[in-house]
Amino acid sequence: MTYPVLMDPIQMDAGIGIVMITVGIVVLFTGKLLLRAVSSVGFGLAVAYFVYIALRLLGFGELFRLMVFSLVFITVAPLGWTLFKVSYALTFSCLFYVSMATYSPGHIPLTILLLIGILVITVAYLVAEYLIEIASLIVGSLMIYVGIVLVSGNIMFSLLLISLLLILRFAI
C-alpha cells in the first residue's frame, strides 16, 4: 500500500525553516520578556488552580471559587518571575557548592561553605536576568540561522543576516 506524499522533503525543509525563522525572531527580540510572561502566568495559574481545587474539596460554590481563583491569580502572578530567578540562583549555587565541597584541596569549615553559598546565591540572583538575556540571544540567533540555511541553503547569507539582526537587536 502506498501513502500519498503531501510535501516533498525540500518543501518541508522550507516550511520548517520559515517557522524557525519566525520563532527565532520572536525569541531574539522578546526572549526575556516572553520568559517573564510565561513564568508569571504559569505560576499564577498553578497556584490559583490549587486554591480552586482546595475550595472545591471544601464544598464552596462555583461563583465563589471563580472569584477567589481570579483574585489569587492577580495577586500571585507577579511573584512568578522572582521565584523563577530564585530557583535559578539556588540551582546554580547548589552546583557550585557541591563542586566546592567535592574538589576543595582540604577540609573547608561548614561556616565558610555556607557563607560562600549565600554569596553565590546572591550573585546568581543578580546576574540571572543578564544570563537569561544572553541565552535568548543565542537561542534566537541559532534558530534564525538554521531556518535560513533550511530555506536558502546558503551559509554565508545566513551568517550575514544573523549579524545584521544582532546589530539591530543591540541598537534597539
Image (tube, helix red, strand yellow):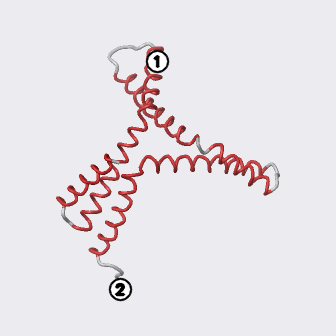
Position in image of residue 135 (x %, y %): 36, 44
Position in image of residue 64 (x %, y %): 79, 53
Residue for badge 1? 115
Q: Residue at x 79, y 57 (%)?
A: 62
Quarter-of-image position of residue 162: bottom left
Element type at mark 2: loop
Please indicate whether residue 21 sits to the left or right of residue 58 in the image: left
Q: Residue at x 41, y 33 (%)?
A: 127
Frontmost residue, 90 versus 134 = 134
C-alpha separation, residue under disc 1 versus residue under disc 2: 67 Å
Element type at mark 1: helix
Residue for badge 2? 2
Q: Quadrant of the N terminus?
A: bottom left
Q: Earlier in the sequence, mark 1 or mark 2?
A: 2
Quarter-of-image position of residue 117: top left
Label 1 is placed on what type of residue? Leu
Frontmost residue, 141 versus 90 = 141
Relative to residue 105, is residue 21 depicted above or below? below
Q: Residue at x 46, y 48 (%)?
A: 33
Position in image of residue 172 (x %, y %): 35, 48
Position in image of residue 95 (x %, y %): 41, 31
Count of labels in the image = 2
Contact? badges 1 and 2 (CB < 8 Å): no
Q: Residues within 10 Å of mark 2 (few under 14, many from 20)?
A: few
Label 2 is placed on what type of residue? Thr
Frontmost residue, 34 versus 49 = 34
Residue occupying the far front of the picture = 172
Q: Residue at x 22, y 67 (%)?
A: 152
Please indicate whether residue 32 sits to the left or right of residue 16 in the image: right
Tell us which disc is closer to us: 1 or 2. Answer: 1
Relative to residue 2, is residue 28 depicted above or below? above
